[in-house]
Image (cartoon, grey):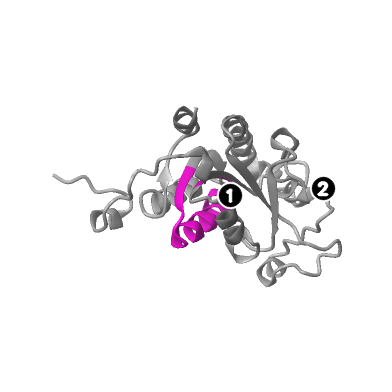
Amino acid sequence: MTQIPDNRLRLVFPELPYFEIKASSAALLIVDMQYLDAHPDYGMGIKLREAGLHDSFDYYWDAVAKAAQQQQKLLSAARKCGMNVIYTRIATLTPDARDVGRQHQNVNIVVSKDSKDAEILAEIAPEDNDIVLSKTSSSPFNSTHINQLLHNLGIDTLLVCGVVTNGCVEGSVRDASDLGYKVIMVPDACAAVTSELHQSALTNLDNAFCNCRITDKIIQEIA
């Protein structure tokens, strides 16, 4: 008897090929690991505390901390083998945030370029040779020059992690896949507000838009 997967479309469509990782043509893409949405004492954390709802995000803050630990491992491995490292962050290009995107305006995500909320977390901070892209949309492919950048760098494979799994990470994976990149998502280096939302994103994406591989597996491959 055929086992029915959670994503029933996999009964109709073939699985994606296994994307191999070649350091010279791959990049580690870390999505939105910034003080705005990845630290309990800033950005979202302040708003939640003011509303008396901070405890409702206990799962998320714990998941973000665990994801950051895995990202530290990925960063070390990527830099050791000379792989390009790219960060995205939600931030405007202007101090007064006049270039914020319409959708971000509607949900009050306004992060000016020089604010603390725009900074990448200290524990995974970019190094001098890393690339940081500021975006005003969920996916960097809609508000940055990332596609041209990857072309210039000769990148055809993306290792994607960050927050939130079912939001900006998922949007980045889908857009990259549609543009023809070989995408490998790293589930244990991602975080969502609930485990259900995290798993739902993986169910939708794995073997449809990307390969999913855990941190240790990826490190073994690129070591």
Residue 88 in percent (x, y) is at: 66, 51
Up the image or down, 72 lies above or below 117; here it is: above
The answer to whether any part of residue 5 appears in the image is yes
User: What range is drawn magenta here?
Assistant: 158-185
CA gap between label 2 and label 1 equals 19 Å
Question: Which amino acid type is marked by label 1?
Answer: Val
Labels 2 and 1: the sequence-earlier one: 2
Q: Nearer the viewer, residue 124 or 48?
A: 124
Classify residue 155 as left or right of residue 146: left
Up the image or down, 94 lies above or below 62; here it is: below
Residue 100 in percent (x, y) is at: 74, 67
Query: How many labels sit on residues?
Result: 2
The answer to whether any part of residue 139 appears in the image is no
Up the image or down, 123 lies above or below 179; here it is: above
Neighbourhood count class around disc 1 (C-alpha, 10 Å): few under 14, some 14–19, many 20 upward: many
Residue at image location 44% in from the left, 59% down from the top: 180
Which numbered tag is attached to residue 156? none
Q: In which quarter of the image is residue 18?
A: top left
Q: Name the residue under label 2.
A: 116
Query: Which type of secondary structure does the marked residue at label 2 adopt?
Result: helix
Q: Quadrant of residue 145?
A: bottom right
User: Is 173 colored magenta in this rendering?
Assistant: yes
Residue 146 in percent (x, y) is at: 61, 58
Q: In which quarter of the image is residue 59?
A: top right
Which numbered tag is attached to residue 164? 1
Q: Nearer the viewer, residue 81 or 28?
A: 81
